[in-house]
Structures are given as C-alpha cells and as structure tokens.
Amino acid sequence: VREGMGTTTGWSGAAVELMGLYVMECCGNGGRGSTTEVISAATSLVTLQLLILSSLHKEISVEYKTNVLSVTLSAMSSPATPAQSSTPSKLRPTLVAERAVLRLLSIVVGVRDGRVTSLLPHVCVLLRDRFIPLGSSDEVHASELLPHLLRLVRRIMSAHWKYFTVTEVVQSPGETAPTNPLAAALRGQRITRIWDNPGRISEFDMIMKLMLDCVRSSQSLPPDVVLAAISALRETDSAVRLFSVRDFAERWRPAYMTAIMEALLAEYLAMLSSDFSKLLYDLARSDWGNFWDSYLSGLIASMPLDGELKENLRQAWRMGGKEMSLTEFCSDCQDFLTEYKYSKSLVS
C-alpha cells in the first residue's frame, strides 16, 4: 500500500475513480442509484480513502490528495434532493455516505497547498448547495452532519486563511504616509480584511452564518453541535485572529455577541454557560472599547428595568471598562447573569 500511494496511477488511482463512481451513484444525479448496496459500497470506498489518508498522511503525495478532492467534488456536484417524508425525523438513506464524505473533505482540505486552494471555490459551492441545506433541514440531520461540517469549515479557514484575507497597512486619518515604503509600513496600522471579491465575501459570510446559526439555535440543537460551533470559532480565532478581521468586526461581531448573551440570559444549555462565556471573552478582548462602550452599555440600556436595577447590572462588572483576564471576565459575567436573574424576578 505504501509503495502505491506516491502517485495517482495504478491501483491507488483506480480506487479513487471507483470511489467517485459509487459516490456519484449514491449521492449525485438526484440520488437515482441510492440502493442499499450502492450506499454501502460508496460508504466503504470513502472510508477506505479516509483510512489511507489518515494512516499514510506523510507518504501520500499532494497530487493524490488533490485527485481525491477533485473526484469527490465532481461526484457530489449535483445539489441534494431534500428528503420528502411524512416523518421529519427519518434519516436520509444516503446520510452515512454523506457524513463520510464530509470527514474525507476535512482531511484533504487541511493540506496547505496551492492545488488544494484552487479547488476551494468548488468546495464552498458544495457546502452552499448541498451540505448546509441538509444540515439545516431538521434536528436529526443537524446532529448527524453539523459536527463534521463545522470541523470542515474550521480546517478551511485555518489552512487557507490567505484565500479569504489580505493584510495591508493603512495610515491614521489626516496623517500623510511617508514616501519610503518601509517607513510607511512601520508607521502605519496593519489591518486584515476580506479580499474585495464578491466570491470571497460570499464564501466568508456563508461560513460565518453557518456558525452563527448554530449559536443562535442553542435552544433547539443538541449540546454537542452547539459546542462544536463554539470550539470551531474559538480555535479559528486562536489560529488566525478571526475576531480582529475588519469584516468580522463590522458585520458579524455584534450579532455573535447578541446571540451568546441571549443564550446566557435565557439559560439555554446551562451546561455550556462556561463555553459561551469564554467565547464572549474572546470576542470582547478583540476590541475592549467596543465591548464596554457600545455593546454592553447598549444591552443594559435596552433592558426593561428601572434605573437602579440597570446600575446594579453595570456594577456587576467590577472590572468594567478595562482589559480583563479570562478568569476575571467569566467571574464578572456570572455575577452579571445572577444580578439579571434577580432583577427580572423583581419586575415579573
């Protein structure tokens, strides 16, 4: 097996092509070939590639991995047909194969290589047209697909960050940039933003909306799915400073903070309150001034409480207005939630 993995020829290439044929019969073409035997064969062949890529990661050439990705994308190119059933909780027959395909994609797109990057637009189309609609179709399919889907988008963002973003140096308002490029780079402020490309912006927004919808749906989604979304967000920020990207800060950060705070205040998935608080901390520390002066003050002002109770909520943040450690933030956040619960009981 090791000797055959260095190229895409011979039995190894044939195995990939065979996998593609069965995946196409199982999941492509509107699922016309979705018999039990075809689904089982497709799943087995995808699982074989998973084992090969996982066990022989260093021995396998990038050409082979790119071929696996290309064949899989081609086989899955037709949009999925949503299950039409009188029983919404009934799983799609092809779900086990589709889940295996997501796991396979997660391994391959983690390769940092231009040949893999060049296929990302097709990967994003597959997510948009097939996997995100399937994962959002009902709670049962969400629990089966979304953890794998979230792992995939996290690997896309971490491994191919430059596909989405560009870092540039900007001068402060009213300041004249030095004519020397090196001096300008040293004096200017470095910002990271999404490329001025409608496709890139759309793909970035699609991924952000997917994870935001998981956080917003904490009342209905299984805890493991919500935790997977929180972990994907925190790990991506840790790897590439997602929360400091200009586009995220301007268009997504307020929505995420609102969704997190709503889940905390309503006590949805109380077992995840610590995870929600840590995610809120990561968002807050990307711009402390915005968190204290804009978001939190606006949140308290909008609450249907009298002036004294609102002031008590402000005082719950003992370190309000300053940078905080994670421990300090989580402690004050818990005090804030306890004070809110008490204030709410007084006016109910």
Image: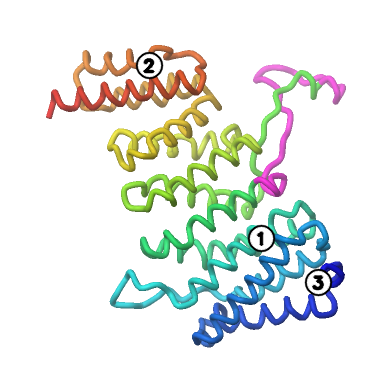
> Which quadrant holds the C terminus?
top left
From the viewer's perspective, is 140 left or right of 54? left
Q: In the structure shown, which secondary structural element does the residue marked by tag 2 occupy?
A: loop
Q: Residue at x 83, y 73 (%)?
A: 8
Gap between marks 3 and 1 measured at Cα: 32 Å
* Callout 2 amino acid: Trp
> Which quadrant holds the N terminus?
bottom right
Query: Magenta part of the protein: which range?
Result: 158-183
* Callout 1 amino acid: Pro
Q: Residue at x 22, y 17 (%)?
A: 309
Q: Is residue 179 above or below residue 262?
A: above
Q: Position of residue 227 (x, y in %)?
A: 45, 45
Q: Residue at x 62, y 82 (%)?
A: 22
Gap between marks 2 and 1 measured at Cα: 44 Å
Mark in the foreground, 3 or 2: 3
Q: In the structure shown, which secondary structural element does the residue marked by tag 1 occupy?
A: helix
The numbered mark at residue 121 is 1
Q: Is residue 101 above or below residue 240?
A: below
Read off the residue under disc 3.
1
Q: Dots 2 and 1: beta carbons under 8 Å?
A: no
Mark in the foreground, 2 or 1: 2
Q: Position of residue 340 (x, y in %)?
A: 26, 25
Gap between marks 3 and 2 measured at Cα: 60 Å
Callout 1: 10 Å neighbours few (<14), some, many (20+)?
some
